[in-house]
Amino acid sequence: MFKYVRRLFTIAKIYDNPTEAIADIRTGSSIAIGGYMNAGVPENLVNALKAYGNYDFTVITQGSSIENYGVNALINSKQVKRLITPFLGSKEINRQYHNGELELELVPGGTLAEKIRAAGAGIPGFWTSTGVGTIIEEGGFPIKYKRGGTGILIQAEGKEKRFFNGREHIYEEAIRTEYALVKAWKADKLGNCIYHRAAMNFNPEIAICAKHTIIEAEEIVPIGELPPDEIDTPAIFVERIVLGEKYSQHVNQKMQFDEQDEHDEKTMESLTRIAKRVSKELKSGMYVKIDQGIPSLVPQYLDEGVILASSSGIIGVGKSESTAYMDPSLVYEDGLLGSITKGGVVVSTNMMMDLLRGGHFDASVMGAFQVSSFGDLSNWYVPGVYVKGIGGSMDSVADKNLKIIVAMKHTHHDRPKIVSECTLPLTGRNCVKLLVTELGVFDFREDGLNLMEMAEGVTLEHIRSKTGCGFTISSDLKTMSVD
């Protein structure tokens, strides 16, 4: 009888508007918010929360990358006390953080997905190799600066470490929140939900990690209309539903590169050459994860048969077309709109990170701030200056058999990015297998960095002058070909 009554009650959980649905979210609440870049963001609920005026929220999200949109709207109005996220794309987040106005807890993308999934599954924590040998394991990342950035007020603690099957792992605790705000494509009146393409992203995990899950749906349909075997989030997790009133269909058309610089036409030509050369390294039948920045240019130059994947959940990223004819839920790195190849699939962000850590990809292409002569990688944080975020990079390098290809500019403000030792916090040690810049192509051997190809019209003397460490030269040194 109790279960029958409860089921009757859950049918009547549809709210008239977003403001009513979030009315009990008080100041100081912890809130998990779904979305990746501009896809799957519960923007009506977020906008209602902003207008409601409560503050000091702890927000867990992957979707904090677009200025004044989604979670960033709450940050801009200074309603967020602590942000827990894998990636930043907002100048305002960086400004507030470095000025001591915002607490920032950075978590690798796959680790964050698993933290919230574990909470919903009743698992207190788990062991992972992601982050081993980095500041994530060791602790010390500044969570909060003193006002004005004059010193560090709160630092991240180190992690417990153990060996499993001869490999080091660190312990991560689950994250359970009071509230979850989730965007669904369709929901029935009971609360069963379906997500649309890459708008799925973190939403299935976000939906199960909270005490109170609030669904914002583009369409609410009668019970029984959704095919049972196509439901992504069952109603048992859902407490409230509201119909989304309107959507901005925000489209990001600006790539996020490794540094904060704007790029002129000449620089973009160099970056395009790098992307074209990387594409030649990828062969038909390979499964390849791409990162933001230069790697997001790679889909435009690939031969058929290479299967590209994005953190948004797309396996089979195709070439970009005119945004006027594209599905805004087919978003990949940088929030750019792409297409999906024939035979492509869309999975949750959690499954995408499982595939990375589990060794199911052949290669991963990413950018970098620094690469050392022995293949150490730094690509997420310049202390006291700039935080890009970890994203899925640490999850990629956790698989020691994965071919890590770095695509980056050779220098930054004329300072070498290829160095003897990385001076910035590491993403991973001895993990880079191939490095492509506008000046040449390098691999990494027992004695360190080795030049395999150099760009047409470039001299060895020029490459040496722009490189911050020594390197050997292949006996069959070739000209770098991009055609």
Image (spheres, rainbow, N blue to C red):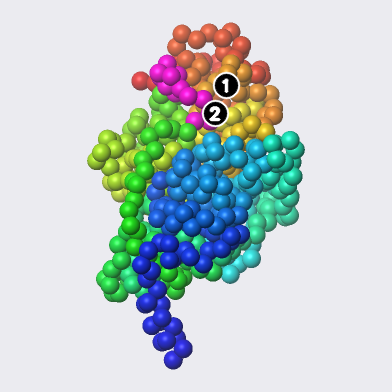
Quadrant location of the N terminus in the rendered image = bottom left
Residue extent of the magenta highlight:
257-271
User: SS at mark 1?
Assistant: strand
Task: Quickly name the residue at label 2.
Answer: 259
Q: How many marks?
A: 2
Earlier sequence position, callout 1 versus callout 2: 2
Residue 291 locus on image (x, y percent): 48, 38
- Residue 412's tag is 1
Give me the residue at 65% from left, 19% from top: 468
Quadrant location of the C terminus in the rendered image = top left
Residue 94 locus on image (x, y percent): 58, 38
> Is 353 located above or below residue 305 in the figure?
below
Tell me where residue 231 sits by quadrant.
Answer: bottom left
Labels 1 and 2 touching (C-beta < 8 A): yes
The amino acid type, in three-letter code, at marker 1 is His
Give me the residue at 52% from left, 38% from top: 90
Give me the residue at 60% from left, 67% from top: 123
Q: State the residue in front, 291 or 474.
A: 291
- Is residue 69 visible in the rendered image? The answer is yes
Tell me where residue 165 sits by quadrant.
Answer: bottom right
> Is 104 located above or below residue 209 in the figure?
above
Q: State the residue in front, 437 or 9.
A: 9
User: SS at mark 2?
Assistant: loop
